[in-house]
Image (tube, rainbow, N blue to C red):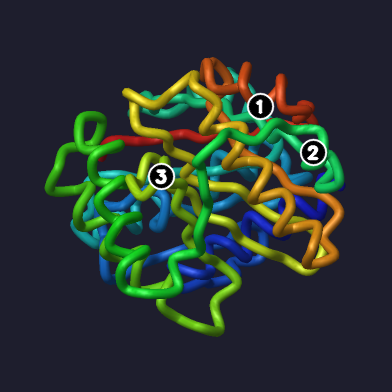
């Protein structure tokens, strides 16, 4: 199952980023939004030694500096030892992310909320609603300018009819109150960028939204779905209540160059 998740994670990244296999790691680059860390990073392959991890990071750090970039983001599906991190002259920000998984069939056990609907953003009206929700939900945390550039970049992918990634929007009556990406791989689905507007949180919209997304994955014959959460994110409580369970973690290092 962990291999399926890793495979899906890498395929999801390829929706936005150019991919280069560097043998022991992979490099992802999105030339349309160079300052978006989620689209511009390296992923160290599982099973790599600590010494080789250090060499990989130093190589990419020098390459990024030479290219005029001001950051290097490193993702590893194995842990990175603190001793390895301590050897770098630039101290990175370290984040741990948890993968939580659920069986799609459990959608039948989740509650619905009256007058609430979920729609795929396959037309301009729903796409516009999803865009507005995304900006409102994220502008405080990342700045409005970046939030706009970020969602507009993502919309390019949503509009591609051949993309396995779609945007869904949750409505209270006809008012958009949440949005979320659903990425469908052959064996597993990824629920990503799940947002409910602050004034509508803890009112049942999130559970209704998850039920609709899991129902969609079940219809597609996909048995499992997963989310990625910050290790200390309070949203994990909602996912647990809905039936998600922890399965693995990843480590991310962010170097400011």
Q: CA distance from mark 3 to mark 1?
A: 24 Å
Residue 219 sits in quarter: bottom right
The residue shown at (27%, 70%) is 32
Question: x and y percent of residue 16 in the render?
Answer: 44, 68
Q: Does the residue at mark 2 contact the one at mark 3 (Cβ under 8 Å)?
A: no
Which circle's residue, 3 or 1, is located before the other in the chain?
3
Which circle's residue, 2 or 1, is located before the other in the chain?
2
Question: x and y percent of residue 2 in the render?
Answer: 82, 45
**Residue beneath disc 3:** 173
- Mark number displayed over residue 102: 2
The residue shown at (59%, 30%) is 97
SS at badge 1: helix
Residue 10 sits in quarter: bottom right
Q: CA distance from mark 2 to mark 3?
A: 28 Å
| Residue 181 in view in this figure | yes
Q: Does the residue at mark 2 contact the one at mark 1 (Cβ under 8 Å)?
A: yes
Image: 247 above or below 157: above
Question: x and y percent of residue 142 in the render?
Answer: 23, 36
């Amino acid at each position: 199952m962990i291999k399926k998740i890793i495979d899906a994670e890498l395929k999801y990244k390829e929706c936005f980023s150019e991919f280069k296999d560097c043998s022991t790691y992979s490099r992802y680059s999105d030339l349309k939004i160079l300052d978006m860390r989620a689209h511009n990073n390296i992923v160290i392959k599982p099973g790599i030694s600590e010494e080789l991890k250090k060499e990989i990071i130093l190589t990419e750090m020098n390459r990024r500096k030479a290219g005029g970039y001001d950051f290097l983001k490193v993702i590893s599906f194995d842990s990175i030892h603190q001793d390895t991190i301590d050897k770098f002259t630039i101290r990175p920000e370290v984040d741990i992310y948890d993968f939580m998984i659920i069986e799609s069939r459990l959608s039948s056990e989740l509650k619905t909320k009256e007058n609430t609907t979920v729609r795929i953003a396959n037309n301009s009206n729903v796409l516009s609603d999803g865009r507005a929700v995304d900006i409102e939900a994220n502008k405080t945390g990342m700045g409005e300018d970046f939030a706009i550039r970020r969602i507009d970049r993502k919309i390019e992918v949503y509009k591609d009819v051949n993309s396995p990634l779609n945007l869904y929007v949750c409505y209270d009556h006809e008012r958009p109150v949440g949005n979320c990406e659903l990425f469908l791989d052959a064996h597993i689905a990824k629920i990503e960028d799940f947002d409910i507007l602050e004034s509508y949180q803890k009112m049942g919209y999130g559970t209704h939204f998850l039920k609709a997304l899991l129902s969609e994955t079940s219809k597609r014959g996909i048995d499992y779905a997963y989310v990625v959460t910050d290790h200390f994110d309070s949203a994990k409580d909602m996912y647990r209540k809905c039936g998600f369970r922890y399965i693995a973690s990843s480590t991310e290092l962010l170097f400011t160059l």
